Image (cartoon, rainbow, N blue to C red):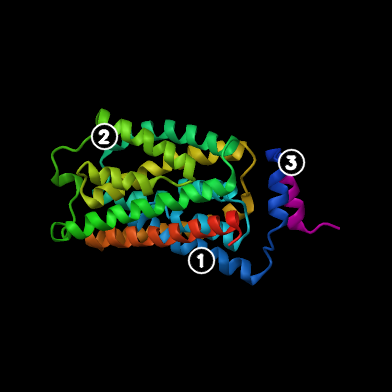
């Protein structure tokens, strides 16, 4: 005799026509308190950091999904991107009202990045093995984290005041931004990120004020994360139950994170962002190497 939960699960599997989803769902013990404790951790911490720092929270959410719930990294990529696409919206509304979203740059960067993400996600789904993906993910986190830490410490004195789009006359929104965002989009699809981990440094490098870089990046991730998750879902890597469990509390955390961003000095945002991704990246690289070489 099937439980109501199992019956609903089988209906979802039939609807999506993806056999692998059924296997993944049945392996989750949703009646366990430990499961829901892990859900809250995976929702609140990355969700809070996502709109606070404008990075999607992927550098923590992906490792947490793989190590706490035991899903494959490709499934973690898919859930992470879907979570970002759905739950970043409340935070983006706060950023928009606070003058942190540069609409012209958003349109150019989002279109370019979406094309790159679709290509990168296809490569992930069809070509690259799991351990290689972990190595790419971790190395990307460490490299970007070190770069942003260095830049932040170097310019800390100049990063004390919040600047909005209403205070700047012009920001880059041409061919240079388009090319860089296409490349960032490809890297995003390749690494399973929401994209902010690449988008924020690019905006900053093109002289976007810190809060504007974070707000515009957050808005852009809605489009790019949707594309990445869709490509991976079509290839059979979505887990709808885990996505639903994590998504709802992440909505609340996303809204709180955006509120914190408005009140935080630019240098603090950059420093917390960079140190967090260095730690997460180092852990994932170590884990991948230890499995590859049997350490």
Q: Outermost residue, right direction?
A: 1
Q: Position of residue 234 (x, y in %)?
A: 61, 36
- Left or right of 93? Residue 284 is right
Label placed on residue 104: 2
| Callout 1 crowding tier (Cα within 10 Å): few <14, some 14–19, many ≥20 | some
Magenta stretch prevailing secondary structure: helix
What's the magenta region? 1-14
Quadrant showing the C terminus: bottom right
Q: Residue 34, position in %: x, y?
A: 62, 70
Residue 198 falls in image quadrant: top left
Q: Earlier in the sequence, mark 3 or mark 1?
A: 3
Q: Which residue is mark 1?
A: 41
Q: Taking 86 as reference, is 253 above or below it?
A: below
User: Residue 44: x percent and y percent?
Assistant: 46, 63
The residue nearer to you, when weighing 57 against 253, is 57
**Image depth: mark 2 or mark 1 in front:** 1
Residue 219 visible in the displayed image: yes
The local secondary structure at tag 2 comes to: helix
Residues at marks 3 and 2, CA–CA distance in whole angstroms: 42 Å
**Residue 261 left/right relative to 253:** left
Disc 3: CA contacts within 10 A as few (<14), some (14-19) or many (>=20): few
What is the number of the mark on residue 14? 3
């Amino acid at each position: 005799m099937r439980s109501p939960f199992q019956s609903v699960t089988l209906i979802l599997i039939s609807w999506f026509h993806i056999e692998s989803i059924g296997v993944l769902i049945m392996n989750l013990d949703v009646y366990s308190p430990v499961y829901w404790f892990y859900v809250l951790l995976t929702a609140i911490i990355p969700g809070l950091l996502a709109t606070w720092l404008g990075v999607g929270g992927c550098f923590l959410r992906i490792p947490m999904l793989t190590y706490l719930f035991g899903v494959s990294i490709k499934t973690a990529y898919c859930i992470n991107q879907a979570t970002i696409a759905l739950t970043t919206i409340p935070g983006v509304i706060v950023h928009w009202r606070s003058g942190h979203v540069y609409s012209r740059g958003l349109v150019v960067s989002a279109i370019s990045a979406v094309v790159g993400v679709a290509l990168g996600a296809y490569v992930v789904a069809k070509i690259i093995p799991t351990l290689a993906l972990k190595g790419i993910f971790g190395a990307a986190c460490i490299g970007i984290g070190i770069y942003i830490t260095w830049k932040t410490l170097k310019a800390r004195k100049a990063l004390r005041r919040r600047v909005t789009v209403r205070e700047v006359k012009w920001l880059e929104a041409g061919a240079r931004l388009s090319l860089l965002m296409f490349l960032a989009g490809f890297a995003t699809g390749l690494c399973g990120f929401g994209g902010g981990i690449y988008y924020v440094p690019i905006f900053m490098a093109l002289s976007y004020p810190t809060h504007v870089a974070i707000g515009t990046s957050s808005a852009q991730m809605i489009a790019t994360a949707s594309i990445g998750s869709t490509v991976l879902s079509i290839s059979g890597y979505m887990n709808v139950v885990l996505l639903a469990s994590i998504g709802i509390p992440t909505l609340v955390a996303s809204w709180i994170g955006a509120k914190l961003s408005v009140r935080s000095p630019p240098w603090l945002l950059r420093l917390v962002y960079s140190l967090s991704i260095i730690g997460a990246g180092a852990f994932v690289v170590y884990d991948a190497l230890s499995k590859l070489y049997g350490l």
